Image: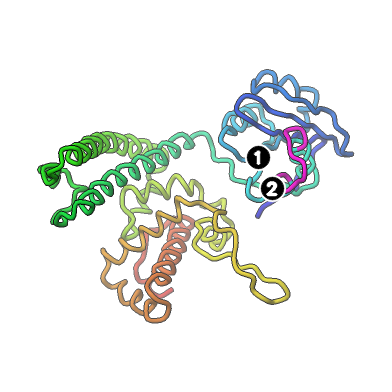
Amino acid sequence: MRFYTQRHQFYCGIDLHARTMYVCILDQAGNKMVHRNISTDADRFLKLIEPYRANIVVAVESMFSWYWIADLCSEKGVPFVLGHALYMKAIHGGKAKNDKIDSLKIATLLKGGLIPMAYVYPAKMRSTRDLLRRRMHLMRKRAELLAHIQNTNTQYNLPQFSVKLRYKSNRPGTAERFSDPSAARAVEVDLSLIDFYDELLKKLELDILRMARQHDLQTLSRLRTVPGIGEILSLVMLYEIHDIRRFPRVQNFISYCRLVKCVQTSAGKPHGSSGHKIGNAHLKWAFSEASVLFLRYRPEAKKLFNRLVRKHGKGKALSILACKLARAVYYILAKEKAFDMKIFLNQ
């Protein structure tokens, strides 16, 4: 957890919403200079903070509409802090909660150097990252359609499919397996949507890859040197990591990828674990997928995996392998070198 500890003359806390924002500005003594609800208008916000702009810092809680105010502060040279929503317990744990109270709490945490910081993703690559996340959402919808066809096939106790339906060449004749006209029609709808998704995703992936090559071709190429990390996984890692230098240690990076357990102890005794949702779910998925593909493409890695299976079991062995791959990716990007299998196996 990182806290914003720089000192300023004025501290601005904002409880931000889609159409309104409650602004609270405190001075160093904790006096309220401004405590007002305004519309989410850039000009009105700049006019409100104009008397304090010489030495002010602005903070908002991380939620879906923070992009515009982060970009506005960056453009105007105003320091901006994005508060980590899951760590801001002072806001969510209060007895009374409203916009006026929340804005004051954000400003107070900011003044006291106690506001937990989230990463402010730069505007240059942010929209492409969001587009890539949208692509993952659409891919999951496509997978749901394929699963529905399989479930329908099981409902009618028909023979299992001998081919994989994710390939278009294997789908002709699928609806004809069902004698019930309504069931056949439902499968036809699924197949039509799958065909549509296939064309849409193909064009979308080409567009994202073209933009990724313009943003950071070298990092993309280095990621592709890792066995099991292909076109899509390398894109996910590129845009979710963005800059490896924002992680001072490899342990910070692995924790951000949700690849380690967060153990709670008190008086030397363990009390379970927590923080499972703190970190990047997309990187967790990417490294989990990469660990499976890594074993498929590099037979020499199976010796390491079998040794881990005998000691920990298959599930935990895959988690350990995913963690090792994350460590390898960290050093690949930090040292700007390609993947070396000998070094990986000897770690």
- Could you tell me the amino acid type at mark 2? Met
139 over 261 or under it: above or below:
above
Mark 1: few/some/many CA within 10 Å (<14, 14-19, 20+): many
Q: Which residues are magenta?
A: 91-101
Q: Nearer the viewer, residue 95 or 222?
A: 95
Queried whether the magenta region covers residue 73, the answer comes back as: no
Mark 2: few/some/many CA within 10 Å (<14, 14-19, 20+): some
Viewport quadrant of the N terminus: bottom right
Q: Nearer the viewer, residue 339 or 49?
A: 49
Q: Are marks 1 and 2 in contact (CB under 8 Å)?
A: yes
Q: Which secondary structure lies at badge 2?
A: loop
Q: Nearer the viewer, residue 106 or 235?
A: 106
85 over 98 or under it: above or below:
below
Residue shown at 74%/25% (left/top)?
37
How many numbered marks appear? 2
Mark carried by residue 88: 2
Quarter assignment of residue 54: top right
- Could you tell me the amino acid type at mark 1? Glu
Q: Which residue is mark 1?
A: 61
Residue 37 placement, left or right of 249: right
Residue shown at 87%/38% (left/top)?
30
Nearer the N terminus, badge 1 or badge 2? 1
19 over 260 or under it: above or below:
above
Residue 221 placement, left or right of 46: left
Q: How many angstroms separate mark 1 from mark 2 (CA)?
A: 8 Å
Quarter assignment of residue 60: top right
Queried whether the magenta region covers residue 95, the answer comes back as: yes
Q: Which secondary structure lies at badge 1?
A: strand
Percent coordinates x, y for residue 73 in the rendering: 65, 30
Residue shown at 75%/22% (left/top)?
48
